[in-house]
Image (cartoon, helix red, strand yellow):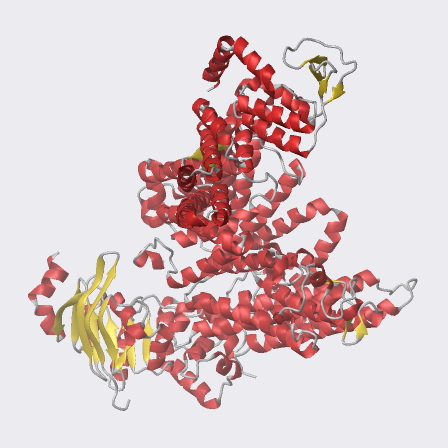
Amino acid sequence: MSLAVLPAAPDARLRLGLRAGLGLFILLLAVMPLLNLLPVSHPLHVSDFLVSITGKWICYAILALSLDLAWGYAGILSLGHGAFFALGGYAMGMHLMRLIGPRGSYGHPILPDFMVFLGYQELPWYWLGFDSFPFAMLMVLLVPGTLALVVGWLSFRSRITGVYLSILTQAMTFALMLAFFRNDMGFGGNNGFTDFKELLGQPLNTTAMRSGLFYASLLALVLSFLLCLRITRSKYGRVLTAIRDAESRVRFLGYDTTRHKLFAFVLSAMLAGVAGALYVPQVGIINPGEFSPANSIEAVIWVAVGGRGTLVGAVLGAFTVNGLKTWLTSAAPDLWLFVLGGLFVLVTLFLPKGLIGLAKGRTK
Amino acid sequence: MSGGRRLYLDGVSVVFDGFRALNNLSLIVEPGELRSVIGPNGAGKTTMMDVITGKTRPTQGTVNFGEIDLTRMDEAGIANLGIGRKFQKPTMFDALTVFENMELALKAPRGPIACLRWKLTGGARAQIEQTLEEIGLQERAQDLAGILSHGQRQWLEIGMLLMQDPELLLVDEPVAGMTDAETEQTAALLVRIAGRRSVVVVEHDLEFVRALGRRVTVLCDGSVLSEGSIDHVQNDPRVIEVYLGR
Amino acid sequence: MKHPLLAFLLLVALALPARAQDALTAALEGLGTGFNQTAEAVDRLGASGDPRALPLLRALTEGRLLRRADGTLLIRGEAGVIEALAGAPAEAAEASPVRLNNRVRVALRGALGRLQLLSPDAAERQAAADAVFRSRSADNVAVLETALGRETVPAIRDRLLLALAASRLMASDLADKMAGIAALGASASPEARAVLLEMRGANPGLAAQIDEAVAAVDRRLAIRRAAETVFQGLSLGSVLLLAALGLAVTFGVMGVINMAHGEFVMLGAYTTFIVQEALRTIPALQPWSLPLAVPIAFLVTAACGAALERGLIRHLYGRPLETLLMTFGVGMMIQQAVRLAFGAQNREIISPAWMQGTLMLPGGVAVTQNRLWILVFSLVVLGLTVAAIRLTRFGLEMRAVTQKRAIAASMGIRTGRVDALTFAFGSGIAGIAGVALSQIDNVSPNLGTGYIIDSFLVVVFGGVGSLAGTLVGAFGLGTINKILEPWAGAVLAKVFVLVAVMLFIQRKPRGLFAQKGRAADA
């Protein structure tokens, strides 16, 4: 390890504390499905609801990490990361739809219900191969990655940065939402995909499968965290930080910033795709609403609340804001949008470094 | 530097919205030469730097480095050819330490994967530490660049320029905000560098230019007004008119 | 248009009483004695061109025409039974309904069509002209010529001419046919085209003339369609212009990214709703609620804008990404507040009479009045905006502050005040846009959401900081969108435009009307 310290956390004690906290938190998450197996009367019993919603939040945390890599480190404020998440989800959804086979309501051996309903005679070409799990997983990475590559290359090459890039990515997810709402796109239109039956030969609605998906998501979160840690602590991470703060100066040092940003953006999109792919079998549905620009911008606020530019902050923010959302939307549904809107104002005006920044301020 | 390439500008014009920032400018800097460029505000000094480093595309004219046409390359490509630049307003990465700033500037493969796999070897560390010593910042290596004083930032940027190991250095007002002693040091450093590399210094401070003691080019209204030794240009009536007459 | 017709009818009623009565009575001969006799009588009535035969024929169609054994014809109406022509009350005993078969029904349709051509009611004449055009028979030529001689309404005249041409085409006389083809070829009606194509098979000798006529119709149809597309494009462009104009000031001129811009538009629309409801108690002012809402909406949203700028945005100057997120949150809260106050459902805004209806331009181009008004309105708002920036002291200070803040401040301009006013100005324009959009869009809390991305694309496409660019950008994107729509459908057209703008920004990152020079790099 080099002696060069990471500037993001000058206070080593705080960083140690955060690491330990995160480790403890992951451990806590890991025992949740086990506690779920305890009898309902047991004081340590964790409800099905809590386990399933935590599984969702873990996916959101991966999305937050991916967004933090792009925004917090490389300065690319993407307002379209929800699109990468949704595309990963759709790729997984296509696999799950293919696995339904003849068990659909129409009993067609190959075509999913909505295609029978819409009068499709055969599977569209872009659905071929999705019956294979490895292929579908490849697409979970490649589809979001390719979109990020194209959009990123076009934008970074012409030096579209800052708010222009933000609006462009928002337009991207908006356009995709409109397109996916169309029935003739071959992605189930308005209703998207649902009624999944099985994955990897196991029925989806068993406790074992739910725990399996939970642990898969948790593993993905840990691996994503380590990957992001590896990236941000390398010289490449410092190049990204440098690009975030003074891109043109980096160029004059001889770095092709387009390539560097593109690499980070594509990687980030792929991570978001993984998050979406893990999310879909857990919630059992994917529809074009996932492309809604509001979803993407909500993910931005997770990162902002937690503290952008710190990986722990992204994870912390995803869990905090979503926990708050779950609690408020049932306790005071009218209030939630005020609180969410208020969070945007609060964080940008008073907490630019998020909760982590608040903690840092305390330890000083 | 083996052989070295010469910088060759011929008939370069840059037009912004009808305003001619450069007007048929021609300039040749030989390998290993130290050249001072002076001129009043708006003479086109910084625009000239921008054209050489790829920030601004000339409206017309030739910009070559050796055999290579610089007008076809972007900033990063030109930097990788061996043309380094120090900005008028020192710019670095405030969220990184002095050492990390130097490390980023250090000549090494620039691709994302290469950066990801980069390991700081003993040789590279020694090189960075040696340069830090040369610019007097070895004590501040682990401090964030953002907390340096203006003079220290000037030095850090010169240090970063050296780390790039360029063949041609473009130095924009290196001594602004420096003490007299530092100014002298800087002059000595630039003279030392020249010979191994070509150096183009843009400066307002005529004393500093005199201290460098080499060939001087005077720019005015986007083209070369006079060229020669410092004494020659100071006695050139056109230069006197531009600098003193108004 | 009513008066000459009334006068004419009066003249007919006065001048031709007795003879017409006789002719009509004679025409009734045989009606009700047998199907063939009835059909012939109906034909005679149709040919008579006398509008007084209409009630009788209608009664026959509806089975309300009775025939007494003595041959007297009676009509059963809501008020009782009357004598068919004289109108005197009568006894319905021993009368039986006149029966119909298919032949009679065909005759009835033709006769009714011809007689209705002369009806005093314009809508009835229009419908009759269409019916006669569709039934197409050489027999109609005479009655159509009569009707044309009397008709004064241009739109109905056009229909009659078409019907006449189509009927002539059915005639056996070659000259008549040629005249019919020429007349149909001079029209711009898809139906005329269909008639021509249909007759092509029956008249192989005239194929060349018919083809030529079809080609002529096609040309005219293409021009009309192009004109309609252009209007739709301009209309969409005017909507985009209105939505983007405020943004062109706050983002384009000031460089402040305001994601709550769409919500200001929405607030403008709700202000229109409130003004309308408030004026319900004053009937005299009701038709003017829309013009009244314009200044009120401007003031309301301008005040909101000033409060947003002074209270929040100014703390984030120089941090555009944070401003973007913060204003997005503000927009979210405004939306939720409106949802709680007014409910999530759409609110109805009543269009004033002068904005309703459709205007027919020459060549059959249909233009809806409200869209036309919005088009005019958007240009007026643009003109006022340009005037405010170019001609007023405030505009001068605004330009000074946005170009060289420090120098403006040193000259005694209170830059904070100018910032607040500029932002209020841009927000106020958004409110005005909301008034106009309330006429064509659903007034609901998420009215604004749909406009923010489009507005940004317009401003960026046109060139940030250039109002001329915003104008060209709005109308350009609107027209491109409408040109693509018939090919790709509304949604894909929108997607294409998004992609096209992205690609365009590749080539010209600073938009159509780029601000050139060093200032643009700052």
Is C34 placed above or below B143 here? above
Is A53 placed above or below A209 here? above
| Quadrant in the rendering for residue C18 | top right
Is A280 placed above or below C464 here? below
Quarter occupied by the C terminus of chain C = bottom left
Percent of width and height locating residue B190: 27, 79
Residue C22 or residue C277, whichever sits in front: C22
What residue appears at the point 22 percent right and 66 percent down from the top-left corner?
A: B204
Q: Is residue C403 visible?
A: yes
Percent of width and height locating residue C467: 37, 46
Is A134 placed above or below A111 here? below
The answer to whether C407 appears left or right of A344 in the picture is left
The answer to whether C47 appears left or right of A255 in the picture is right
Q: Is residue B207 visible?
A: no
Percent of width and height locating residue C198: 51, 46
| Quadrant in the rendering for residue C346 | top right
Q: How many marks?
A: 0
What residue appears at the point 55 percent right and 29 percent down from the top-left corner?
A: C128
Residue C123 or residue A188, whichever sits in front: C123
What residue appears at the point 52 percent right and 84 percent down from the top-left corner?
A: B117
Residue A218 or residue C499, whichever sits in front: C499
Percent of width and height locating residue C201: 50, 50
